[in-house]
Image: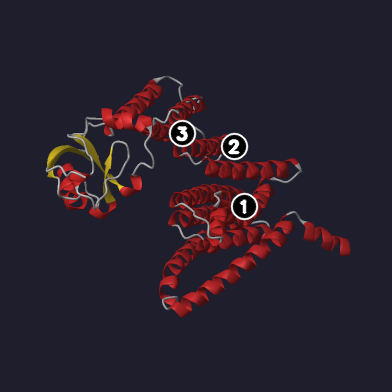
Amino acid sequence: MTQSPFVRLTIRGSERAADVIVPGSLTPADVIPEFIELVGETTKVSSLGLFTVLGARLDHTVPVGEQELLDGQVVQVLPLADAPLEPVVHDVVDRLTAIDVRGLWNDTSRPWVLGILSTVLLLLSLWFIPGAFSRPWWPVAGMYALTIVTAALKVHTLAWPLYAGSLLLTFLGGINFEFGSKESAIWWLSAFAANLAVFGVLRRRFLALGTALATLAASIGIFTLSTTLGATVEQAGAIVAVIALAALGLVPRFAMQGAGLYKVQDALAEGDDVKVKRVDVAISEAYEALSMSVIVLAVILAISLGLASALVAENIFAAITVAAVAIAMVFRTRHFPFALHRAVLWGAAIVTGVCCAQAIVASNPDLSLWLGVGVIVVAIAVYTVPRFAFRSSVNSALGRRISGVIERICTLVTVPALVGIFGVYSELLRTFQ
């Protein structure tokens, strides 16, 4: 192949572009550090590559003059992870027409700025309309519907600011309700479900969205069925909490199975040729499904345990149930390797503790001081004991075994204690007497 002595190229980065003349004897590996400096990229050289507008990657070992590049051809500096998998017509058109890549006002920032400004204007107009927030679900529903439409049209740079505005509008509308009322609970639960739906559509994670909404619907159905059969709201909360704790142990397996990780593992074990992209997609879908399901279960546990905590001062079995579920939930966080999952479960446990403390203080105000001291002692113990008692690997293994035993005991205790909330043991005792 004839080698061109010099090749004129237009190098495009994420923010800037540059016209260069490259000696044809140099390879892309030789010139990419200079290209990165010219277009102002901050990513490491090892994670970047040169691509044509059609998505074809330049061979880093072949000289530039031997790669049949046209005079003045556009070459992009892209992260290898974001490289296009295959050329698509609209991608080519977008890349050829997106020529404004200089400065802060570029093709990436423009939709964000317009979306944020339009959201702010909508919020201001709703704020100054008399009585607009007396029925806040109407503007909120409109905002969420607009977000769904923009996401369906794949205008994600506009959909995300609209979603942020929807969250703000949800908060502004929610504070109009009296805290703790039935209407407030319905409002926040509906807003939570709507946020899950919109977030799932924005991220294109329909498996995760379906798993999360199915979990939420099952919990609401169990709660409604329990109250219909004669249970009080507090007793129904205890039932939902115990079932949610059991579901928390099954969620990881369901997430991996639904995402197809087990099929990928079987294919690898059988020696089949599995593409890396398929593995990445399966892992990503499993993580999204697991994250959404754990967040939903944490919210359900916080609400249900908060309802059941109203009985802890007057029913010993309710106190045992709430304590066992909360402790098992906290110890179960060690099965989740991601900080997000552990954080939401710890948050649910803290909400449960606050609700229990309020119920106990309302029943016996003299215990408020002792409860405060107990909270301080528990917080110090939780923070210091793992750091000092389990420094060595032997002690860490012992700590994991102890926590596993405590978790199993608390899980086994929940069902007998839940039965006791309904007065079954006292009825049996009176029958035998």
Residue under pointer 2: 182
- In the rendered image, the quadrant that contains the N terminus is top left
123 lies left or right of 399: left
Nearest to viewer (mark 1 / mark 2): 1
Q: Do labels 1 and 2 touch, CB within 8 Å? A: no
Image disc number at residue 244: 1
Residue type at mark 1: give it.
Ala
Q: Residues within 10 Å of mark 2 (few under 14, many from 20)?
A: few
Left or right, 13 with respect to 408, comes to left
- How many numbered dots are placed on residues in this image? 3
Q: Residues within 10 Å of mark 1 (few under 14, many from 20)?
A: many
> Residue 392, relative to residue 433: is it above or below?
below
Residue for point 45% across, 26% down: 146
Which of these two is toward me, 221 or 160?
Answer: 160
Spatial CA distance of label 1 from label 3 is 26 Å
**Kind of residue at disc 3:** Thr
Here the colouring is secondary structure
> What residue does disc 3 label?
170
| Mark nearer the N terminus (2 vs 3) | 3
Secondary structure under tag 1 reads: helix
Q: Position of residue 76 (x, y in %)?
A: 25, 40
Mark 1 and mark 2: span between their CA atoms? 22 Å
Residue at 67% from the left image edge and 60% from the top image edge: 414
